[in-house]
Amino acid sequence: RPTNATYAANDYRSLPPVPAEWIFRFEDWYGRTAAEVPPGGRQPDNEDEDEDYAEMRAIAEEDRQNAIPRLSAAANDLGLKLPDVFARFFMDDRHAGFFRSVTDCYFNLPERIVPAPECPEAGLIRFYSDSQGCLHWYLYLTPEGDECVVTSGAHLGGSWVMRQMAERSNWRYEDEEDEPGRDFAFCAPSFAEFILRTWLENMAWYSLHAQYAGPVETRGAQAPEVAAYLGHYRSRR
């Protein structure tokens, strides 16, 4: 899709369809692929990391272990329920270790659930962010059990990791909280489809730019699902 920016909006209906069976098999397929990543996810490039960075990694790992129980309890208090696939995905550190982002996005669970603008009974859970804060992606949940993924430039929900770093460093932590009234855009009807499509889009890029691919990217780009995904566009030429 032609674009002159890092991110661009496209009509959801114009995107390559993600077959229901891919989504249904998502955990099994993704779990087998992620099994090739060692426990602990992606290992640091620099074994001689400084003390501050090592401390931040330790706090981030603590947050990874505690975030889902914390958010699950908060969801229950709000009359919401975390989707099982969402909870299982973030409880397994191999998934984050295997995931790749051409635009340097990363998984980023919040400190708390935020009421959705204009629909306060629904909740927003930030889970994925651009490293420069251009966009953040949220799981949108309703009391009826519906879900979808939306995106916005607004950073909502705070950061447990940054709060812990602030307390240990004796500096004042303040949420970099934007006004929740900023626009949100629909991305996917479910968390599973969003993860699958995001993975496919990134692996498709690596299949077209093999010179930038490492071992994990090369294996991912060779998946038949990637070729089928790209076929949507090749068939229109």
Image (cartoon, helix red, strand yellow):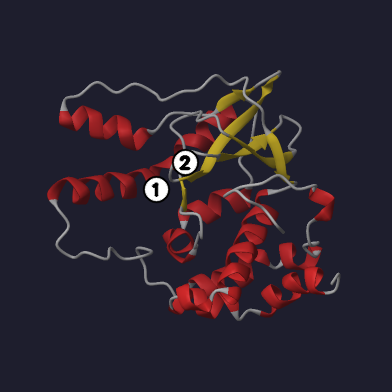
Could you say which quadrant of the image residue 67 lies in?
top left
Contact? badges 1 and 2 (CB < 8 Å): yes
Q: Quadrant of the N terminus?
A: bottom right
> Is 46 located above or below residue 138 in the figure?
below
Residue pictured at 47% horizontal, 78% vertical: 211
Q: Quadrant of the C terminus?
A: bottom right
- In the picture of the structure, the residue carrying the numbered disc 2 is 109
- In the picture of the structure, the residue carrying the numbered disc 1 is 64
Per the image, label 1 sits on a secondary structure element best described as: helix
> Is 59 located above or below residue 31 in the figure?
above
Residue pictured at 66% horizontal, 36% vertical: 140
41 on left or right of 133? left
Whether residue 213 is visible, yes or no, is no
Kind of residue at disc 1: Arg
**Given this view, does label 1 or label 2 mark the residue nearer the observer?**
2
Kind of residue at disc 2: Leu
Between disc 1 and disc 2, whose residue precedes? 1
Q: Position of residue 31 (x, y in %)?
A: 55, 69
Q: Residue furthest front?
A: 4
Whether residue 199 is visible, yes or no, is yes
